Amino acid sequence: MRFFLLPFLLLGLVRPSAAQTVPEAYRAVFSLEALGTAPPSALLAASYTLAYRGLVPHAAFALAREPSGRSAWGYAGGAPTAEAAEAMALERCRRSLGPVQAECRILARDARLADGPAVPLAEGRLGPFRSAPLMLRRGPAAAQGVVIWAHGYAGPARDLRGSAAPGFTAILNDAGWDVLRFDRHPGDDALYTSLPRLTEGLAAVRAAGYRRIVLAGQSRGGWQAIMAASARPELVEAVIATAPAAHGEASRANNLLAGIDDFRRLLAGLPARGPRLAVALFEGDDFDPDPERRAGLVEDAAATRPAPLLVLWPAGAEPAPIRGHGGAADPRFTMLYGACLLTLVQAPEAAAPRGLRRAPCGGG
């Protein structure tokens, strides 16, 4: 079975929209029941109920299911129109059909079931951040805290503001955390311009009433999240950095030594007693000069640092390993390692996971 994910300013305090007041309807839209009467596979369930929620409109999810439950699906987000999102989702579903004898149909458009309930998109801005549209927003008073997700950087010519947040952010959302996005225009996303906006924006989030803040990010978004937490550790509960990178492709020889040395200094910049930190590394990452050495650096730091520090380095998965710079976007990463990330954020310090973990996390 194959699946497809299309990853594709103002600093002052801006009052966010009122919290969504329809959690029951939200759960109905993103429930397993929406997938049909036959029990779905774990991968289908994770793809729809978790990974799909990280998309931004226009988004669509297409599904083909036999009465036996055998399924194929595809989904897309960040499309220019609703029609384009549906066409892309259907195309990806049809490409994944294989032996499935069923027609691909649109299951959901944004946060609306094609033949069922709908909930309003989460809207509003808070400083430089905006609400993740398909996540449930509770508001500062009711939420456990807030996760701020930052996408990567692909140069000034490629816009990643429509890229997806990985499925583990939806796990945190289900556990009571609101989710904001730190989306940056590619023409104004140099490190010296976007990092200060991220760091200064933390004060606006705290002023809005959020009690705890988790910074999470992919690639350079993850690297910046660690830097911002080092600069304002009193405002950050935890950091989740997936495939953190800041040096271009690892195949460029001049980046090899700099990438490792700068990563060592990046870790050293975090105060020993917090925030908590999780780093996810992947084999076959074109932007990681040496995953094994970087995993060792985190493991060594975890042995002496009082605050929990965890490195996830997938050892392999069926039917194929979780690999590459975008490994965290694979729904299997959420299925296999999401429990560790939730536990890192929420568990008492003594129970939080630490050190190197290659095996799936199970109960955390």
Image (cartoon, rainbow, N blue to C red):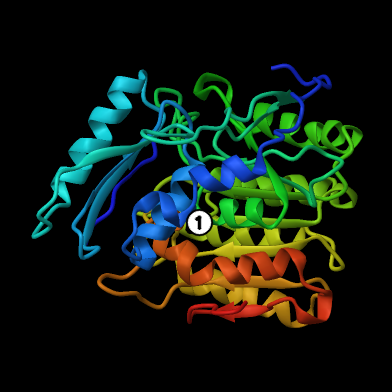
In the image, what residue occupies the spot 76% across and 66% down? Answer: 346
Quadrant assignment, res 248: top left
Q: Within the image, what quadrant is residue 205 found in? A: top right
- Left or right of residue 160: residue 222: right
The relative height of residue 177 versus residue 80 in the rendered view (above or below) is: below
> Within 10 angstroms of label 1, few (less than 14), some, or many (20 or more) residues?
many
Horizontal and vertical percent position of residue 134: 54, 37
Element marked by disc 1: loop
Q: What is the quadrant of residue 156 in the picture? A: top left
Q: Position of residue 16 (x, y in %)?
A: 76, 25
Please state the horizontal and vertical placement of residue 36, each as a whole percent of the image: 34, 54
Image x and y of residue 330, in percent: 39, 57
Q: Quadrant of the N terminus?
A: bottom left
- Would residue 327 be seen by someone viewing this image from the given angle? no
Q: How many marks?
A: 1
Residue sitting nearer the eye, 276 or 293? 276
Measuring 23% from the left and 39% from the top, which residue is drawn there? 105
Residue at 55% across / 44% down in the picture?
220
| Amino acid type, label 1 | Ala
Q: Is 232 placed above or below 55 here? A: below
Name the residue that disc number 1 marks.
243
State the residue at coordinates (80%, 52%): 144
**For residue 93, side relative to residue 326 (left or right):** left
As rendered, which of 38 and 203 lies closer to the eye?
38
Residue 176 falls left or right of residue 349:
left
Whether residue 178 is visible, yes or no, is yes
The quarter of the image holding the C terminus is: bottom right
